[in-house]
Amino acid sequence: MVRLRRRVALVAAAGPGIAPIIYFGTGSNGAAAALSTLGLGYLLFYILFALGLLQLMPSDAARFARRAGYAGLLVLGALPSWGFLALTPFTGVAGVGLVERKEPMRT
């Protein structure tokens, strides 16, 4: 079940993580430099979140990367921008990637 949640989180976070760079990368929109910088921030936090989800590092570091990447996506999603408002629900769904399997208690 945790693996399914992580897959859902990875796909959901791809919306805010990749979409701004694709949008600003086309160059046909005449976007301001500040908005393209935010798009780059979304991409970097998505990469950090994805590295943690895919467990491409030791367990504690992956947990930290997952949490830090998601926190960064939340912070960027909280910035007042009508252009990024549509990406906020995807960030919310990506939160299921923070779920971890509960380890049994040892006595």
Image: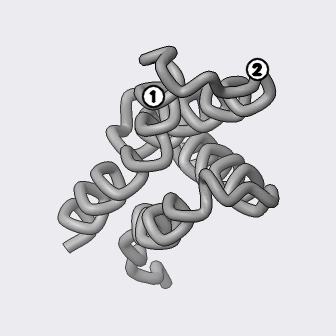
Residue at 41% in and 77% down: 102
Labelled pair 1, 2 in contact (Cβ < 8 Å): no
Task: Say which quarter of the image contains residue 42.
Answer: top right
Q: Earlier in the sequence, mark 1 or mark 2?
A: 2
Residue at 73% in and 55% down: 81
| Percent position of residue 41, x then y | 67, 31
Residue at 38% in and 28% down: 56
**Residue type, label 1:** Met
**Count of numbered badges drawn on the protein:** 2
Colour basis: one colour
Instruction: Determine the CA span between mark 1 and mark 2.
Output: 33 Å
Mark 1 or mark 2, whichever is nearer to me: 2
**Residue type, label 2:** Ala
| Percent position of residue 84, x then y | 60, 53
User: Alpha-carbon neighbours of circle 2 within 10 Å: few (<14), some, or many (≥20)?
Assistant: few
| Percent position of residue 90, x then y | 44, 64
| Circle 2: element type | helix
Per the image, the residue denoted by label 1 is 57
Per the image, the residue denoted by label 2 is 33
Q: Quick check: 59 above or below 67? A: above
User: Alpha-carbon neighbours of circle 1 within 10 Å: few (<14), some, or many (≥20)?
Assistant: few
| Circle 1: element type | loop
For the N terminus, give its image quadrant.
bottom left
